[in-house]
């Protein structure tokens, strides 16, 4: 299974390189490259019934064959005299020289192709059962569905019993005219016919596939064994069998991936030094919660309790916390994270919050400073632009332990940044950081100990995706919004309504409110997006927003420039801030009540949800206008869903269905699993089942075999 695909007949270095471009390097990869759809095969005909130019399939016996010499370089021709009950004809294979060795007299094949003036040109050939060249796949017959031992056949309730007989050891689609034909998609400059032919050769090795799943689980689900599932996925006998085979493979894929995540989690925890137990008196944090001008939501209280249990070691007995805090827009994640940071401070330790951008770090520092105004605790702020005159004494206070809390960007990872007793790291918008960056912050804990890590994201992630992307973390979800938070109105407008939209924007500005205009997502580069935003700000100031103060903020500006722009907007000196997605998270200006998103169809639903969450954060509510740049039916349907739906988690599910795994924030995120058969959220039920089945397997030889198969499938944890 680990052999390169060049070990299969007819695949040389050039074709192998092209296949690698499509993600297929090993025989195992080829087996898992199953058809995504099935159709009817060409009509079966006798040789004497063929009509010129008509696609047809013929079951024939080889009479004789030969290689034909050609003068044209790179062209090979194999000819054979083939026969059936209606007579005989010449059949020709172009650029398939390996077929000459298989076309032995007496061998039987199902040929597909077309009749032309020179004979029958073959596009695909599959051995028929009992063929002299070994058309039957080697190995023992496959048992009934789900049978992999003497436990007996499985009879899954969802699919019903499906019989797998000894004849099925042959390529199934060659057996009956009614069998569905797998449509092997093109890829890597390789056409479907060639992928199908290669898949046939790979499936001939299916008997060597190890069965990674305990027989009792297969029996319980009514699933076929591994070899039978691979064969039936590529070359099914009927539609019911192909559906069951694909279901088994999707379930196995999810099961193996969960095993990898679980092993990674256990390995990291066993390799980690014990965490500092933050079980000191909680007088400061408790008094702070009681002093807040609002009550925590039930979700916030539950999240705080779960995190406190991790920090005090009640659940993990000193193992470091590895938790993801995932919250709806405006659900109060910062308050929950700050409560955890206070637990570190009052226990004689330190806490750090790392944000991906200076704008977000500055916003966090300002919010935390405001929330802690009456506690005497002041957070420090460290970014790449922090002046040395401020940086030096700050780092000294951090190293001596005088400083309890610090907020920063990647600057926190610098070697010169040393902590006296770092116990907790809060990593905001964690998907924007690499694993190594997070590990460097964790390594700043005292020698012999590990820091607790709380990952935090404002992007609602569907459960199906969180189990595959963050399956190695404990997950806490905030869905409930604080009382009194007004809903944001979202309206979808066409190009002809643009004037009316900006008329309403001006109406809000005339009432003393403020607004945003978000520029379209430019995928080519951040620099192009910055130029587009600057040009739009200049145009709006001269046209739709003439007479109002228009500001600009984008990712190419320096931290100091962003700080000046944000300060001017927060102080009300700027009426409208023209921005790129740099404002997606962390911008909190209660007086902002209106947003216009240009080119809205270019963003993912979850990203649009994040953007509109920047308005309506005060007492006046908010309105978000979506102005798509194109009028496609599909994009308008997506945007209409956003206008109707305010639940970020539901929108994330819709985004996952419409745009695919990993695109829930507008661009595909690094590190997400790419499944060959399973598809989320469609297979969410199978994912839940796979997690439960993994618990049933438990430690032991069967789990070890499963993990080895998982490593072969997905790589090392």
Image: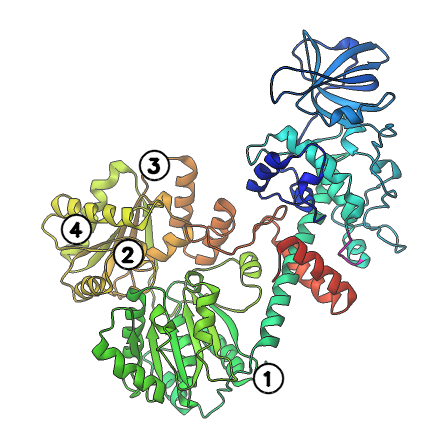
Mark 1 surroundings within 10 Å by alpha-carbon count, few (fewer than 14), some (14 through 19), many (20 or more): some
- Give the mark, 2 or 1, whose residue is nearer the N terminus: 1
Measure the alpha-carbon separation of dots 4 and 3.
25 Å
Q: Is residue 525 above or below residue 689?
A: above
Q: Is residue 478 visible?
A: no
Q: Which residue is denoted by mark 2 in the rendering?
A: 555
On the picture, is 541 further left or further right than 423? left
Q: Which residue is mark 3?
A: 630
Q: Are marks 2 and 4 in contact (CB under 8 Å)?
A: no
Q: Which residue is mark 1?
A: 317
The residue singled out by tag 4 in the image is 506
Question: What span is in magenta?
Answer: 210-214
Would you call the spot at circle 4 few (<14 residues within 10 Å), some (14-19), or many (20 or more)? many
Does the magenta-highlighted stretch encompass residue 213? yes
Quadrant of the image containing the C terminus: bottom right
Callout 2: SS: loop
Q: Earlier in the sequence, mark 4 or mark 3?
A: 4
* Residue 667 covered by magenta stretch: no
């Amino acid at each position: 299974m680990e052999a390169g695909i060049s070990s299969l007949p007819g695949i040389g270095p050039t074709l192998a390189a092209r296949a690698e471009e499509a993600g297929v390097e090993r025989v195992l990869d080829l087996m898992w490259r199953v058809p995504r759809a099935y159709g009817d095969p060409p009509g079966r005909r006798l040789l004497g019934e063929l009509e010129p130019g008509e696609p047809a399939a013929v079951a024939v016996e080889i009479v004789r064959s030969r290689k034909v010499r050609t003068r044209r370089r790179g062209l090979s021709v194999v000819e054979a005299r083939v026969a059936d009950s209606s007579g005989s004809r010449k059949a020709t294979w172009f650029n398939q020289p390996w077929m000459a060795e298989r076309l032995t007299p007496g061998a039987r094949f199902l040929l597909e192709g077309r009749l032309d003036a020179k004979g029958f040109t073959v596009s695909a050939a599959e051995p028929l059962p009992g063929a002299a060249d070994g058309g039957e796949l080697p190995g023992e017959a496959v048992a009934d569905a789900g049978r992999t031992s003497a436990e007996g056949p499985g009879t899954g309730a969802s699919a019903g019993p499906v019989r797998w007989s000894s004849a099925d050891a042959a390529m199934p689609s060659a057996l009956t005219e009614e069998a569905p034909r797998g449509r092997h998609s093109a890829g890597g400059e390789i056409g479907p016919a060639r992928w199908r032919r290669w898949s046939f050769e790979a499936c001939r090795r299916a008997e060597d596939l190890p069965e990674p799943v305990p027989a009792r689980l297969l029996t319980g689900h009514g699933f076929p064994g591994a070899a039978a599932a691979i064969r039936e996925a590529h070359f099914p006998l009927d539609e019911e069998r192909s559906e069951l085979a694909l279901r088994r493979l999707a379930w196995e894929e999810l099961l193996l991936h969960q095993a990898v995540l679980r092993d990674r989690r256990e390995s990291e925890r066993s390799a980690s030094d014990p965490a500092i137990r933050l079980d000191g008196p909680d007088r400061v944090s408790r008094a702070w919660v009681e002093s807040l001008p609002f009550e925590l939501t039930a979700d916030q209280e539950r999240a705080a309790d779960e995190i406190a249990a991790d920090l005090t070691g009640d659940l993990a007995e000193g193992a470091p916390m590895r938790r993801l805090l995932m919250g709806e827009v405006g659900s109060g994640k910062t308050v929950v994270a700050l409560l955890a940071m206070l637990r570190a401070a009052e226990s004689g330790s330190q806490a750090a919050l790392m944000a991906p951008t200076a704008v977000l770090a500055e916003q966090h520092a300002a919010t935390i400073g405001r929330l802690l105004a009456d506690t005497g605790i002041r957070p420090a702020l460290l970014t790449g632009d922090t002046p040395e005159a401020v940086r030096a004494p700050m780092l000294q206070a951090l190293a001596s332990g005088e400083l309890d809390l610090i907020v920063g960007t990647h600057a926190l990872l610098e070697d010169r940044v040393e902590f006296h007793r770092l116990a907790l790291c809060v990593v905001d918008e964690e998907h924007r950081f690499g694993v190594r960056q997070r590990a460097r912050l964790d390594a700043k804990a005292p020698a012999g100990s590990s820091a607790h890590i709380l990952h935090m994201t404002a992007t609602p992630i569907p459960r199906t995706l969180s189990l595959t992307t963050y399956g190695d973390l404990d997950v806490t979800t905030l869905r409930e919004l604080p009382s009194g938070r007004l809903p944001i109105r979202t309206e979808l407008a066409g190009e002809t309504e643009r004037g009316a939209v900006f008329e309403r924007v001006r109406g809000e500005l005339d009432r003393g409110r403020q607004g945003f205009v978000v520029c379209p997502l430019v995928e080519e580069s951040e620099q192009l997006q910055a130029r587009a935003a600057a040009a739009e700000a200049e145009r709006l100031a001269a046209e739709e927003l003439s007479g109002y103060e228009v500001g600009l903020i984008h990712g190419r500006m320096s931290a100091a420039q962003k700080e000046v722009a944000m300060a001017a907007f927060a102080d009300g000196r700027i009426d409208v801030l023209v921005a790129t997605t740099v404002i997606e998270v962390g911008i909190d200006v209660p007086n902002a009540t209106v947003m216009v998103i240009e080119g809205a169809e270019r963003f993912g639903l979850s990203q649009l949800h994040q953007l509109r969450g920047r308005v309506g954060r005060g007492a006046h509510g908010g309105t978000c206008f979506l102005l798509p740049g194109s009028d496609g039916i599909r994009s308008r349907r997506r945007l209409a869903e956003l206008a109707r739906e305010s639940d970020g988690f539901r929108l994330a599910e819709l985004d996952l269905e419409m745009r695919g795994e990993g695109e829930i924030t507008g661009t595909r995120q690094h590190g997400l699993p790419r499944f060959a058969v399973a598809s989320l959220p469609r297979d969410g039920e199978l994912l839940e089942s796979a997690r439960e089945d993994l618990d049933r397997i438990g430690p032991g030889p069967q789990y070890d075999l499963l993990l080895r198969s998982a490593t072969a499938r997905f790589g090392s944890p």
